[in-house]
Each structure stands twice: as structure tokens, then as C-alpha cells.
Amino acid sequence: SILLKSGCEITRILNILYEQSNKKLKRAIEEVSINIQNGNNITESFEKTNLFSSFFINMLRAGELSGNLDKIMNDLAKYYDSEERLKSKIISISIYPIILIIMSMISGFFILVFIIPNFEMIFEANGINPPLLTKILIGTSVFIREKYLYIFFISLISILLVCYLIKYSPKVKYIKDKLKLKIPFINQMMILVITTRFCRTLNILVESGVQIVDAIDISSRALDNIIVYEKLSISREHIRRGNDISYSISKSEVFSNSFISMLRIGEESGRLDDTLNVTNDFYSEELNIKIEKAMKSVEPIITLVIGLIIGLFIIAMVIPMFDAINSIQ
């Protein structure tokens, strides 16, 4: 964007970017540069690499046709910066709970493999008949100690298989996208993420002069959720039939009534792009508040659950010892 505004020629811009990029990006820029030198326009040159999203390509096309490529690039820079910030916030929510869960699993494994066998020997040496819970833990400990190699390889293969299916299987991705919108608490967060991303993308496309049906199609693809994309296809059909934008989007039943009301106001006033911009800011702030609340609530809940599990382990091992001491007395 900066280089375009300065009047720098496109092949020179690509050369400058090439020098500052990592290996993966260098290959992409080199391919784009070759395509331009072969007589293709900028949009076609990026599109032929098959490395950039349909949203990015459509934005380039709109910028090239309107002669505002520098502005479009600036809008794209802001968009991807916002997307990166959003991803970072979501990851920041996940890191602490994941660490706690991993540490609890390691602690549980350590207790089962190294501590419970000592209690098992004490019970056997003293002829103590432990309660059912203690027997279950001892049985689990014996199973893990005897079958640990099988458990390790089966767990590793299962994790790799699940990751592969999530990435490459349309059916599994469909189920995953559906669960995101069904699981309590997570679905609220996902709707806010979807609304913010949809607002941001649609705003840029509308400002760039992209037809509303195409803009909604591109925006719904950018959400990366098959369920939402299918629902918004209903909205596109309603718009093609001549219905209002706000009414058509309400038929998808994805967004809140407040969002639909804001769209209606923007549509009636003829300032849809400005309304989308304001709405994006509003929902971005809502999302930030929701993320902060989630971080404050999730951490103590997980800590409590881990404490209860480890406490259960300790109680299951200590109670038989107390019973044995009481019987001796």
C-alpha cells in the first residue's frame, strides 16, 4: 500500500517485498512477478498462484478495476492485522487451560505409575481389602504399567488421525463447524467472532464497489464455517429475488436481532458501509469483553476440576489406610 501510494512500479514493489520475505513468501512473490512479466494483470497474476484466498483476489480485482489498488491494499492490511489480533486473543484463552490440562494428565500419570503401586504393596502386605474406588485406581495403574507402549502408540495414532480428518475430511469439518455453533458458551463466542469477521469483510467489499450478492458470498466464505456459509446462501437467494439486504440476512438465522437492526438502519439511510464500520467496532469491543471474561472464568474452573481429581486420587488411597489403622485399634 505504501509503495503503491509512492508511485512505485509493481514489478519493483515485488522485488522489494521479495528481498524482505521468508522462503515461502519469496516463492509466491516470484511466481506473481513471472505471471506479470508474461502479460497478466495484477489480479490474474496473484490468482494463478492458487495461494491466496478468494476474498483477497476479489479485493485485488475491485481495486484494479476502480484504480484504487493502494487504498484496497491498505484496507486489506488493516483487515489481516485485525484477523491476526483476533486469532492471538483466541489462542491466549486456550494456552493456560491447555497447559493446566496437560499438567494434570502428567500428574495423574505420575500418581498411577509411581505412587499407587507403593500403596498396592502396602495393602497386599497387610491384607487390606480396599474399597471399590481404590480397586479401580489400582486396576488402572496395573493396566497402564503393563500396556504403556500400546497406550502410547494408540494415543499418538488417534491424535494424528483426528488432526488429519479435521483438516482433510469434509464430513468431519462439517461436524466440527456444527459443534462450534451448538456447544453452550462456545457458540456465543463463535457468533461474535463470525459477526465481527462478516462485518469487517462485507464493509471492505461494499466500500470497494463489489456487488452485494458477490460481497455476501465472499464474506461468508471468509468465515471458514460450512454451516454458516450454507445458511447465508439462503440470504443470497433472497437478495437475488429483490428483497432487502437486512431482511435477506435475517432469513439465515445466523446473526442477532441487534445486528439485523443496524443493517436495516444503514440500508434505509443509504450508508451501509458506514453502518458496517460502526457495527464492526461495536462487536469487536463486545468480543474483547467476552474474551476477557472467558479468561477470568475458565482458569479457576479448570484449576478446581484438576484439584478435585487429584484430591479424589489421594482420598481413594488414604481412606483404606485409616480403615486399617482403626481396625487394629
Image (tube, rainbow, N blue to C red):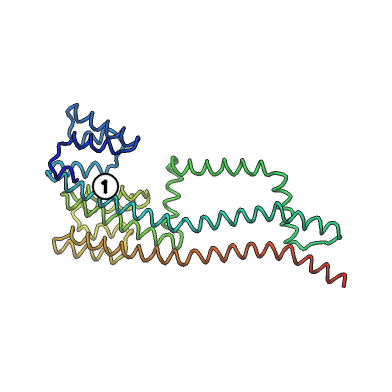
Vertical placement of residue 307 versus 13, above or below: below
At a point 19% along the width and 28% down the height, the residue shown is 37
Query: In the image, what residue type sits under mark 1?
Result: Ile
At a point 42% along the width and 42% down the height, the residue shown is 170
Q: In the image shown, does 28 or 43 lie closer to the viewer?
A: 28
Give the image quarter of residue 52.
Answer: top left
Q: In the image, residue 49 lies at what x, y percent?
A: 28, 33
Q: In the image, residue 197 lies at what x, y percent?
A: 30, 55
For mark 1, what is the residue? Answer: 218
User: Horizontally, is 250 left or right of 162 in the view?
Assistant: left
Quadrant location, the N terminus: top left
Vertical placement of residue 39 versus 179, above or below: above
Give the image quarter of residue 18.
Answer: top left
Q: In the image shown, does 130 or 218 lie closer to the viewer?
A: 130
Q: Residues within 10 Å of mark 1 (few under 14, many from 20)?
A: many
At a point 49% along the width and 58% down the height, the residue shown is 96
Vertical placement of residue 168 versus 320, above or below: above
Q: In the image shown, does 319 or 191 lie closer to the viewer?
A: 319
Q: In the image, residue 299 lies at what x, y percent?
A: 50, 64
Quadrant location, the C terminus: bottom right
